[in-house]
Image (cartoon, helix red, strand yellow):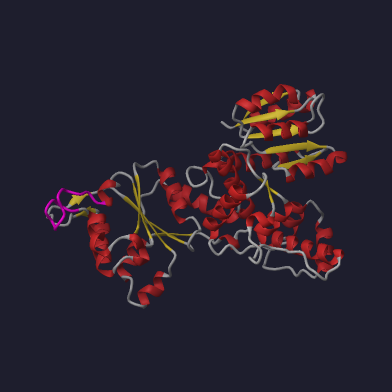
Amino acid sequence: MSRLCLVEDDPIMGESLADRFELEGMDAHWFRSAEEAEPRLSAEPFAAVVCDIRLPGMSGDRLFERLRVRRPVLPPFIFITGFGDLGRAVELLKLGAADYITKPFDLDRLIARVHDLIGPVANATKVGRDGPLGGSAAMARVERMLQRIAPLDAMVLIRGETGTGKEVVARRLHQLSGRGPFVAVNCAALAESLAESELFGHERGAFTGANQTHAGVFERADGGTLFLDEIGDMPLALQAKLLRVLQDRAVVRVGGRAPIQVDTRVLLATHQDLAQLITEGRFREDLFFRINVVELRIPPLRERREDILWLARCFLAECGERRGVRQCSLEMDAEEALIAHDWPGNVRELRHTIERACIFADGDRLHALDLFEPGLDAGPTEPEDESLDAYLASCERRYIESRLDANAGRVSATAELLGISRKSLWERMRRLGIRKKGGGSE
């Protein structure tokens, strides 16, 4: 059960919220003041915090600022604010708060937002282990598919560009399956002379230097999962032997005769077009049909831009926790630069960019220049001969276009995300010359 911290001085609203959170299956801890909540938030883990800004004594935003100094990683904060505090709420978002909601608010909407945040950000330091895969609709679909196929024993072919996180998905599927050991092998890195021995093992004396019996990866993954990465780079001769192992569910060690039965679930991954490799005679068609039982495509980061800031904040939390320092935060120009970049190296490139910035930045607030060297595609730069109004319009156009792309062109969903009406968004699009893309509904 997720532990939720509620900081609200109004007895009626506080009790109502606490009861509703409990009904939603959360372990809600209700505090009537920031002074009462602060020591608990400093010492205990919470999945999320719902906090009023206006509190007796210490304010909610002051509580947040004090905790940021003490803890490198904070649970996501959702602030409850009145219209008069809206500007302060926006400032808190820039400092790392997750969201705010204005009074009077729709309780169901608040509950839905808490549910959205509890999973992803509570596990922010576990991306790639047992945390969620992303915050986008595309990765939510992948997660749902993993949930469905995890109990099965079917082989899974994971396709995606280099750096999209194919091994992360494989490890997530293994974790959901509850099987034994997880063994990963990069087929492109196997020396051809030793590849057969590494995969299937060898008997003592099978070849020069084989001084003892060696169990291959199929045996080492017995009862668990074997992940064969970059399967498209496996030599043809070895592909034939792999096909036989997959069919018989048994290996014969190099220099051996007796088959050894293995209960190993096999997951495979490639960044290549296997159909094209088959046409070129570089991949066996019968092996392709054998391994392509369930296919998962991991979209590149440029196709799911709503994951960029989500992942960046996760990596910021990882860096802070690993280095034992306060977590860095992203300034608005840094966020714009991250969203505007095309990320040819995908998630791996994003992780390395964040890690490098955290190491070399002068402070704990990252700007675009901390993330990208001058001259790289780092999003909007200041023009030399452009008026302020024109520059601001250019920034507004880029941001609205990025949000429309993230919502598959859906105007209503984008307007809600931006906190404006659909009519207002349409007017801005007409003024800025933004054309509606895709087939998104209104």
- Which corner quadrant of the image does residue 191 belong to? bottom left
Q: Is residue 205 above or below residue 393?
A: above
Q: Closer to the camera, 84 or 16?
A: 84
On whether residue 391 falls in the magenta region, the answer is no
The answer to whether residue 261 of the structure is visible from this angle is yes
Total number of numbered discs in the rendering:
0
- Which corner quadrant of the image does residue 410 belong to? bottom right
Q: Position of residue 276 (x, y in %)?
A: 40, 74
Q: Position of residue 417 (x, y in %)?
A: 73, 52
The answer to whether residue 407 of the structure is visible from this angle is no
Look at 44% across and 53% down and name the residue there: 167
Task: Magenta stretch: give its range.
Answer: 202-216
Q: Closer to the camera, 341 or 14?
A: 341
Q: Position of residue 307 (x, y in %)?
A: 61, 54
Look at 14% across and 52% down and name the residue there: 203
What predominant SS class does the magenta segment belong to?
Answer: loop
Residue 53 as seen in the image, left or right of residue 358: right
On whether residue 203 falls in the magenta region, the answer is yes
- Which corner quadrant of the image does residue 157 belong to? bottom left
Residue 110 as seen in the image, left or right of residue 323: right
The C terminus - image quarter: bottom right
Q: Position of residue 83 (x, y in %)?
A: 86, 41
Residue farthest along the bottom direction in this orientation: 280
The N terminus - image quarter: top right
Q: In this view, does 439 lie above or below 127?
A: below
Look at 43% across and 50% down and name the residue there: 149
